[in-house]
Image (cartoon, rainbow, N blue to C red):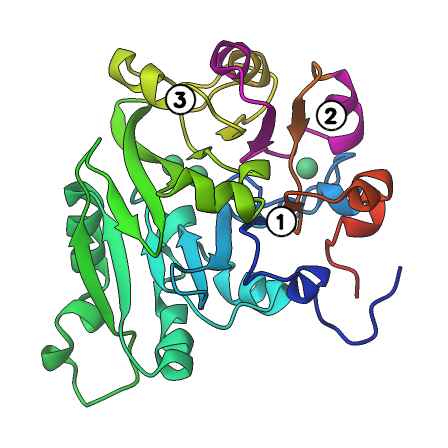
Amino acid sequence: MSDRSGSHPSNRRPIHRQVSFEFLGTGVSSGVPVIGCSCLTCTSRDLKDKRLRCSAALRFGGDRGEERTILFDAGPDLRQQALRAGLERVDALLFTHNHVDHTWGLDEIRRFNTLMEGPVDIYANDHTLEFLRRVYGHIFDSKNNVQPSYVASVIPHRLLPMVPEELFGLRITPIPLLHGKLPVLGFRVDAVHPMVAARAGIDDLLPLAYCTDVSGIPTETWPMLEGLRTLVLGALRSRKHPTHFSIDEAVDAAQRVGAKETWFIHMNHEVRHEPVDRALPNGIRLAWDGLVLPRTAEEERNEDEWALGWRE
Ligand SMILES: [Zn+2]
Ligand SMILES: [Zn+2]
Ligand SMILES: [Zn+2]
């Protein structure tokens, strides 16, 4: 299905009335295809095999009905992802951890500063904030720049595990996860007012947990994964890996969590969408770039038309 307007179908959603979750990128740190690789996935014509670096956008009407966008991570593909998804604002940017594939898009926040005429609130744990301050000196110590220049304007906020932030009618709780030896954050998203959420159809999506790079779930985190409608979980490849769940490990964790829907992300090029997705248990799927939740019945029936990879 061609889309001559160049706009993404998610743009046409009534986002003031319904919360939506868009997978901006579902790929490993190298992206898929991998540069210079001629494997079956990297040469696949399936748009679901085109994966930008992991990021996601939660778009909804805030507590006074105004449009809001919460962004999870800002990787090196943020510019391309924002263009494709039609993002015009970032009300909060939440970082899961400091790795380059999740942070190297911070400079793109400049454009949202201009559009929104102000700084953007960013949220991260101490380790990630320290990393950002160190590698983005031109942003955090802009007074030392050789000359005044157009750099991103951000307001950093410190996240503590298990201490929820209330943002525009949503409660976002940072949950501790292990990424190899590195403690990272996942995010659990609940509606602050369940009755309002039910009227707005938000129960079709929330509670949702976003858990990207993860190889272990600490004991204290399991209760935070109870009662989920939607689980988004990292699953790197079939073979074991020291810092990421394999597909089998992610399936085990997803089945223990028991969310109504689980979507895997952060797949590498050993994972070809169609055969791997088909072999997953009921209720567990591989996500793809451009997928927007919740889906209408029509979108589920015609899901390949909604697989918005690199259509041009
Ligand atoms: Zn990653
Ligand atoms: Zn490949
Ligand atoms: Zn990582």
- Tell me the crowding category of disc 3: few under 14, some 14 to 19, or many 20 or more residues within 10 angstroms, Cα based: many
Q: Quadrant of residue 152?
A: bottom left
Residue at horizontal 63 percent and vertical 65 percent from the top: 84
Q: Which residues are magenta?
A: 252-279
Q: Is residue 243 above or below residue 303?
A: above
Q: Is residue 199 above or below residue 89?
A: above
Between the residue at mark 1 and the residue at mark 3, the CA separation in whole angstroms equals 36 Å
- Name of the residue lying farthest toward the right: 1
Q: Write down the residue under mark 2.
A: 277
The residue type indicated by label 2 comes to: Asp
Some atom of ligand 2 lies within 8 Å of the CB belonging to the residue at label 1: no
Q: Is residue 60 above or below residue 237?
A: below
Residue nearest the observer in this picture, 161 or 25: 161
- Kindly check if marks 2 and 1 are in contact, taking CB atoms under 8 A apart as contact: no
- Quadrant for the C terminus, please: bottom right
The residue type indicated by label 1 comes to: Ile
SS for tag 3? helix
Q: Quadrant of residue 184?
A: top left
Residue at horizontal 57 percent and vertical 41 percent from the top: 27
SS for tag 1? loop
- 82 vs 98, left or right, is right
Q: How far across and down, in percent of the image, does residue 43 sit?
A: 79, 43
Q: Is residue 42 above or below residue 256?
A: below
Q: Write down the residue under mark 3.
A: 225
Q: How far across and down, in percent of the image, does residue 111 sit?
A: 42, 78
- 146 vs 246, left or right, is left
- Name of the residue lying farthest toward the bottom: 147
Determine if residue 86 is in view: yes
Residue at horizontal 67 percent and vertical 21 percent from the top: 283
Numbered circle sitting on residue 35: 1
